[in-house]
Amino acid sequence: METTPLDSKKGQSACKDGEDCQKNGILQKGLTSPGDKAEAGQISNGYSAVQSSGAFLIPYTIMAIFGGIPLFYMELALGQYHRNGCISIWKKICPIFKGIGFAICIIAFYIASYYNTIMAWALYYLISSFTDQLPWTSCENPWNTDNCTNYFSEGNITWTSHSISPAEEFYTRHVLQIHKSQGLDDVGGISWQLALCIMLIFTIVYFSIWKGVKTSGKVVWVTATFPYIILSILLVRGATLPGAWRGVLFYLKPNWQKLLETGVWVDAAAQIFFSLGPGFGVLLAFASYNKFNNNCYQDALVTSIVNCMTSFMSGFVIFTVLGYMAEMRNEDVSEVAKDTGPSLLFITYAEAIANMPAATFFAIIFFLMIITLGLDSTFAGLEGVITAVLDEFPHVWAKRREWFVLAVVITCFFGSLSTLTFGGAYVVKLLEEYATGPAVLTVVFLEAIAVSWFYGINQFCSDVKEMLGFSPGWFWRICWVAISPIFLLFIICSFLSSPPELRLFNYNYPRWTVLLGYCIGTSSFICIPTYITYRLIVTPGTFKERVLKSITPETPTEIPFGDLRLNTV
């Protein structure tokens, strides 16, 4: 089918800035469906396995068992034993790899620069939901074009190759205002509505973490438990919708042919690492506040299982609604599920909610859930950076935490300004694909190598035994030494060998964005070889002596023993 770009004359002929745009007259339903156009309106979140969900669950489980959970356990144990953030901890493990900590801080800044923008979009939707009729259900708004077609409305409707749903126009033309941008080379001005939304988000973040884990811990009791309540409500509601069974069947039925595709395994590994969070400095930071003899092994297993089961449950919440959408559109679930990432939330799911009974209620709780989930991630990410810097420079910031947190939040706000422009969605996708993914996986890979091969797997297991009273078994040792690093190396090489060709809505990213993306990703990773070089230069002695000194722990770890603290190397 022919598609029309958002900035083409045909696509905008009936709407100009500042003018009201009216919908088409009465149309005849049934020629084509919005699924024919779905591919042009997708935002990828880096994981393309939504169209092979059944096949996705198998590699997801395998990657969780042999990759994600072992590294999750390793970081918890490191943080709890050495009681330091992601920068200063390397003095006690392998000083030459201290650049990993600085790389993590830069990656956290990139994530804060675009992730909170997505929360700002959700906040805008939440505010817009406080009305009798949700604004993305109608084609009679100032931002709508003549191409707007509401196929849920009563009457005869024809869906043509140029038709756009009101939910998509609300998202693209009203929230993002992406039609005012020509692409990355012309992102346009800043949307003041989104700027106000993200200011509110960062204000909440600041007052939640400014006093440390004591305040953020209390806030997390709300932000961590509330989403489970909402997920349960949405699951029950989704299961009672007509056609929900079609979505569940699509979610659980494996496509065995897909298991032979490398991309599905890469997507599964990336998903598990990003959901559990090793490599972001978060686990090291929070574990450093644990009691020395806390059972971090049990914490790792329970937390990982709960995390994976939550993801599994969320799949039912999403796919029951996608099955309902497929039933209403009279098409396959695979067509409805073409939209991934933010588009799945802000177009497909928002459209489904808008056509449910009690739509306003479900819209409010859904977007409130998205915001609370996002706040949880932001709290953790920034706390990882804050703990790392305070531990590294205690003489400077130890008594000035509130001011340092304020400086971090303000820096992240200014860093997010490019994502608040009319073309900000293009920037978000670029950062999402290049700034975090490969960089984080490289960091986790080098972290596993540094701990298992340089610090020594026997020494690490001895540390764990000193805390817990028992040593990790052979399964964990093999995963830390070989299996997990091999998984990570496979993912990294797959990404480098075939970088993603970015496309957002009808905009194809120019080829120079691949180079730009690699530069952004390298800007964090470059800290690691830079610090290795610096360390070898400033360390006295022959080259062999420099290497040996640089890989030998230089700061003893204090082990609590009653009221005393004993030093150990």
Image (cartoon, rainbow, N blue to C red):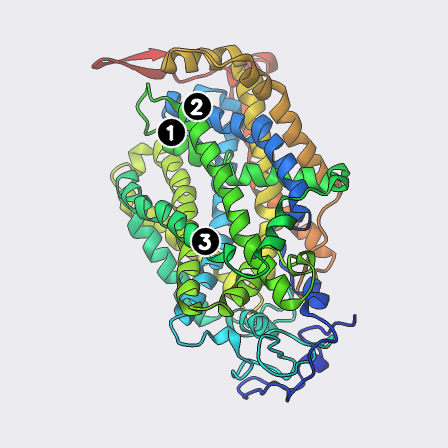
Who's the residue at 53% across and 13% down the image? 456
SS class of the residue under badge 2?
helix
| Disc 1 residue crowd, few under 14, some 14–19, many 20+, Cα 10 Å | many
Residue 279 in view here = yes
Residue 430 is situated, as x and y percent measured from the top left of the image, at: 62, 54
Residue carrying label 2: 78
Q: Nearer the viewer, residue 173 or 57?
A: 57
Residue carrying label 3: 236
**Above-or-below relation of 235 to 19:** above
Q: How many marks?
A: 3
SS class of the residue under badge 3?
helix
Say whether disc 3 or disc 1 marks the residue closer to the N-terminus.
3
**Above-or-below relation of 531 to 154:** above
Disc 3/disc 1 C-alpha distance (Å)? 35 Å
Q: Nearer the viewer, mark 3 or mark 1?
A: 3
Q: Is the residue under label 2 in contact with that under label 1 (CB below 8 Å)?
A: yes
Residue 87's tag is: none
| Residue type (three-letter) at the residue carrying disc 3 | Val
Q: Is the residue under label 1 in contact with that under label 3 (CB below 8 Å)?
A: no
Q: Nearer the viewer, residue 408 or 134?
A: 134
SS class of the residue under badge 1?
helix
Q: Quadrant of the C terminus?
A: top left
Residue 287's tag is: 1
Disc 1/disc 2 C-alpha distance (Å)? 8 Å
Q: Is the residue under label 2 in contact with that under label 3 (CB below 8 Å)?
A: no
| Residue type (three-letter) at the residue carrying disc 2 | Leu
| Disc 2 residue crowd, few under 14, some 14–19, many 20+, Cα 10 Å | many
Where on the picture, by quarter, is residue 161?
A: bottom right
Who's the residue at 75% across and 44% down the image? 498
| Residue type (three-letter) at the residue carrying disc 1 | Ala
Where on the picture, by quarter, is residue 365?
A: bottom left
Question: In the displayed structure, does residue 1 sit left or right of residue 533?
Answer: right
